[in-house]
Amino acid sequence: MIISHTHRYLFIQLPHAGSTAIGAELLENYEGEAILHKHAHYLEFLRTASPDEKTYFVFSSIRNPLDEAVSIYTHFKTNLYQNFTNPKKRKKQGGWIDDYTADFYQWFARVQPDFSTFFRHFYKLPYDNLSCLAHRRFDYIIRFENLQADFSEVLKQLGLEQKRPLPLVNPTKNREGDFLSYYPPTLRAEAKRVFGPFMRKWGYQFPPDWGDMSLSWSSQLQFQVLGWGRQLYYRYLKVRSNTPARLVGETAKRWLKSGFVRTDSR
């Protein structure tokens, strides 16, 4: 999370949506200051923010999940920077890889799955991410697909002159072709079920040649119910320190994992 008291903005860094590049640029050129932790969410900020800070211009980013899934798959496949095998990067040792992600990588390394196998193993329930917590309340949402132009628009709305084009940081390497090429016809119905509600919410479209992209009532209902569960978890359970709440929180985390991407890879 990046804040600037000089320019009165707050940037919420959503994983996999260009937040590393934007955050680095704000720190270097636009009087930004890192607070809390990198992927802190807006509710965390509100718990400690002053009344004046709560009036700052708030922006974040978002990404087409069809593209994000391919990026996550490539991160696992390449194990870039040994993120999944270096013990020093585990959360319990101060890093960002949690036990769930490390265990998943062990399965990935053993099976060496193609993308379809990975997708069916990793995505069980309708997809959502931390954007469900507060993104609708923000002043601007940068689209990963339009990163340069949208970042320029944010600076314009802040009354800032852009100093340079946004540098590319942590690009997904060794990707083979366009992300849509990873989705064979046999996987498209499953991708629609998993990603459809999120894509409808944020105005993303499936390719026209994928055929009928109407959503089932069951996937939409699951998406809504899981969204309520995530809201409750992050609002009331994640911050509690007493033992009963921790137990409930851990149970909730296990329940949500299959539908809520847990990796924090960039």
Image: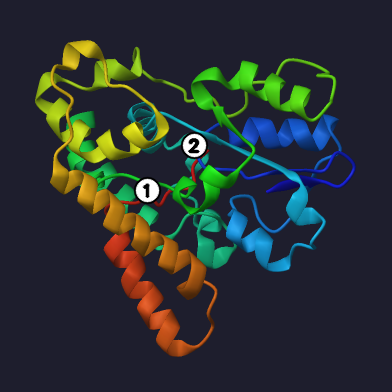
Q: Is residue 199 above or below residue 165?
A: below
Q: Secondary structure at mark 1?
A: loop
Please, what is the three-letter code of the amino acid marked with disc 1?
Answer: Val
Q: What's the mark number on residue 4?
A: none
Point out residue 171 in the picture as x, y percentages from the top left corner: 53, 24
Task: Give me the residue at 47% from left, 50% from top.
Answer: 130
Is the Cβ of the residue at disc 2 closer than 8 Å to that at disc 1? yes
**255 or 212, nearer to the observer:** 212
The single residue placed furthest to the bottom in the displayed view is 243
Is 171 left, or right, of 127 in this rendering? right
How is colour applied across the structure in the image?
A: rainbow
Q: Earlier in the sequence, mark 2 or mark 1?
A: 2
**76 or 16, nearer to the observer:** 16
Q: Which residue is mark 2?
A: 16
The single residue placed furthest to the left in the displayed view is 186
Is 14 left, or right, of 103 in this rendering? right
Task: Give me the residue at 14% from left, 17% from top.
Answer: 211
Point out residue 23 in the picture as x, y percentages from the top left corner: 69, 37
Q: CA distance from mark 2 to mark 1?
A: 10 Å
Q: Secondary structure at mark 2?
A: loop
Is 116 left, or right, of 11 in this rendering? left
Point out residue 39 in the picture as x, y percentages from the top left corner: 59, 50
Task: Give me the residue at 49% from left, 20% from top.
Answer: 145
Observer able to see residue 137: yes
Q: Is residue 117 above or below residue 225?
A: above
Q: Which residue is mark 1?
A: 261
**123 or 77, nearer to the observer:** 123
Observer able to see residue 112: no
Please, what is the three-letter code of the amino acid marked with disc 2?
Answer: His
Task: Give me the residue at 35% from left, 55% from top.
Answer: 227
